[in-house]
Image (spheres, rainbow, N blue to C red):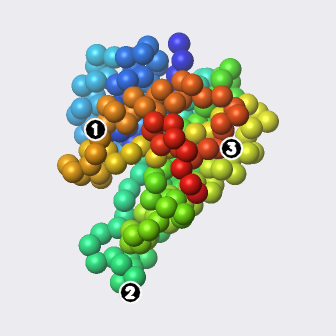
Amino acid sequence: MSTVLITGANRGIGLEFCRQYAQQGWQVLACCRQPEQAVALNQLANSMSIEVHKMDVIHRNGIDELANRLKNQAIDLVIANAGIYGDSSGYGLGNLHYESWLKTLETNVLGAVKVIEALLPNLRLSKEPRIAVLSSQMGSIEDNGSGGSILYRSSKAALNATMKSIAIDLESDGVGVLIFHPGWVQTDMGGTHALINTNTSVSGMVEQISRFNMQNTGQFIKYDGSLLPW
């Protein structure tokens, strides 16, 4: 049985990843900040092969503790999904909220990288180790034609740059890296006016992960597989 670990698994895209991989027969390690409050995730776990684990990606000691509990367990796929938007009304240039900016960077960049770093020994126990990170088209510098959202854009641009380097560093180990724009998705972050639902987004990403080969490692792609500019 293949094993996937998913961060931010209690709602939205993360919850849908849990559902789809469990339905495909994977062992799912679902991580979230407050498992006792994750009603939908716990209900899903009661009926499928899902283990719920406590993990807050900004608490690095907690990540290490979970990695230690999972020691010697092969993990075939790590999905770094946990993230925050950070920007709020009035946070534009001239009124930037630097504490929120730091928290956004810590969550979206350092948190994702720390999870990957802590679980590298588990990934190396897999025959086909894969890492998928949830970035955003808003992290594309070339695509930015509207400005704004400085906190979120900068965090996703930093994540893209970091994961590109990690993809190169891990290529000789056979660890593949996928950097995804999930689309504009109907979630708490995306809002009700978003273009696609979680099922469409996640189905597309699951398909791209299943078709992945090492020639494509480190690419920045949409959920449908189309390439995005950096």
Direction from residue 126 to residue 105 in the image, left or right: left
Do the residues bearing badges 3 and 2 touch, measured as CB atoms within 8 Å?
no
- Near mark 1 (Cα within 10 A), the count class, few <14, some 14-19 or many ≥20, is some
Local secondary structure at mark 1: loop
Q: Residue visible at 76% across and 33% down?
A: 173
Q: Quadrant of residue 130?
A: top right
Disc 1/disc 2 C-alpha distance (Å): 35 Å
Q: Earlier in the sequence, mark 3 or mark 1?
A: 3
- Near mark 2 (Cα within 10 A), the count class, few <14, some 14-19 or many ≥20, is few
Amino acid identity at mark 1: Asn
| Residue 229, horizontal then vertical, whole percent | 56, 54
| Residue 30, horizontal then vertical, whole percent | 41, 32
Disc 3/disc 1 C-alpha distance (Å): 29 Å
Q: For the view shown, which residue lies furthest in the right direction? A: 172
Residue at label 3? 167
Q: Residue visible at 65% across and 50% down?
A: 164
Residue at label 1? 197
Q: Earlier in the sequence, mark 1 or mark 2?
A: 2
| Residue 222, horizontal then vertical, whole percent | 48, 43
Q: Work out whether residue 104 can be spotted.
A: no
Residue at label 2? 94
Direction from residue 151 to residue 122 in the image, left or right: right
Foreground disc of the pair 1, 2 = 1
Amino acid identity at mark 3: Ala
Q: Nearer the viewer, residue 209 or 62?
A: 209
Q: For the view shown, which residue lies furthest in the left direction? A: 192
